[in-house]
Image (spheres, rainbow, N blue to C red):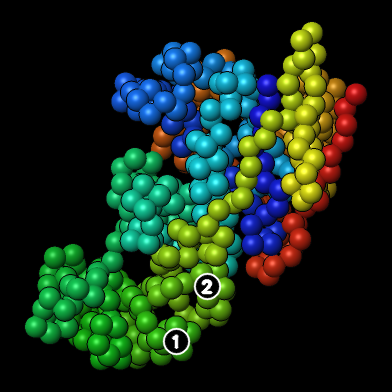
Amino acid sequence: CVFELFGRRLPGARRFGVVAGTGRFLQLLADYRFGDDELRFLRDHRVVDATTLRFLEEYRFTGTIHGYREGEAYFPGSPILVVEGTFAEAVVLETLALSVMNHDSAVATAAARMSVAAGDRPLAEMGSRRAQERSAVAAARAAYIAGFAATSNLQAGREWGVPTMGTAAHAWTLLHDTEEDAFRSQVDALGVGTTLLVDTYDIEAGVETAIRVAGSELGGVRIDSGDLPTVAAAVRDQLDRLGATRTKITVTSDLDEFAIAALAASPVDSYGVGTSVVTGSGSPTAGMVYKLVARQDAAGAWVPVAKASTDKASRGGRKAAFRTLDAGTATSELIAVSDGFERMATEVDHPDARPLQVALVEAGETDATALGPEGVARAREHHARVREELPVTALALSRSDPALPTVFVDVA
């Protein structure tokens, strides 16, 4: 059988999606086993029969998976993962694949839009307190792949190699008798290059105190409240008047891609984003599905199969994906439909197209280059290259049709 993971549409009427979670899925797949406790639960609650229990006890995925590189852009109908194996081996993976890819791709798609809006200004992911504990780590990973520079989640740094950072909390200021005492303690511990949080009480007074304590070489100030464009301009003017011309301004406070875009002309040096990025900025799932698209008949011939119900129809057959290019700019998502990957890759002539799929699992063996921190770094680099080839219309934030049309071609 051949199963395919794809999205029928892009979440939130966005112009492109970002594939994320592939490395996490492959790492989980390598250890995907049914242990004694799981098997005991299934037996005691009569969920499955004895034959199925024996199958699950020995379960190992021995099939093949082709798919988009992590960090790749995707569009409606893109065959993001193509899973080939026996029906039993492949169908068991549905929830695992979808739960990982739907969450991580939703976060990465939102993060990419924020990265586009931020331009050259760095973004820090700070949303762990707004997510389930393991989802927070996954979200930090996905945001980094899609263009964020760092995360406040130390586990994401330890597990996936994502650069980490942190800022002072309001609780630190409130712990001390005065704001000045808090600033002095922080500077004594971390040096004048630190970033002081100046809006616990009055922002103007906070900036004045910060420079009095740390001097004009203070590394930065953070603003977490107020009308940010207005406040940022006032703080920049005040810092310059106090001689702190090189002190940077970081803003936080419920930012999303639209708020970041609205700050483009403001004297802001970096952003911290929390709730919006870890929840997909209004689209917490990518809406991907996992469908059977081909099976072998009794004679071993491939038979395309597809769901045909209203609004949820899919395209049957094994597929290979290409991105057509014109002078280096993407023009379409070209999906060749046939009964064999080899024939599609060698006999379909697309000289001005980039193949999108790579081998992720061969005969049960996972591509190690997609795993761990090294896989994350490769995915981040790949995403940066992919974004450069997208048409400029893909980078707009307004709701619209996908930036590239998906074109299906049949290969005899």
Location of residue 68 by image quarter: top right
Secondary element type, mark 2: helix
Name the side, left or right, on which 192 lies relative to 203. left
**At which x and y percent is residue 195?**
28, 71
Q: Residue at x 40, y 75 (%)?
A: 253
Q: Which residue is mark 2?
A: 260
Q: In screen coordinates, is 69 left or right of 247?
A: right
Name which of mark 2 and mark 1 comes first in the sequence. Answer: 1
Q: Which disc, if any, is residue 111? A: none
Q: Residue furthest top?
A: 299
Identified at 76% across, 10% down, the residue is: 298
Occupied quadrant, residue 218: bottom left
Amino acid type for the residue under numbered disc 1 = Asp
Quarter of the image with the N terminus in it: top right
Q: Is residue 111 visible?
A: no
Dot 1 corresponds to which residue? 227
| Residue 406 rendering spot, x and y as whole percentages | 80, 46
> At numbered mark 1, what does the secondary structure look like: helix, strand or loop?
loop
Q: Amino acid at mark 2?
A: Ile
For disc 2, the neighbor class at 10 Å (few under 14, some 14 to 19, many from 20) is: many
Task: Please state if 135 lies on the left or on the right of 103 as rendered.
Answer: left
Using a 10 Å C-alpha cutoff, classify the residue at mark 1 as few (fewer than 14 neighbours), some (14 to 19) or many (20 or more). few
Residue 379 coordinates in the image, percent (x, y): 53, 41
- Residue at 23% of width from left, 75% of height from top? 170
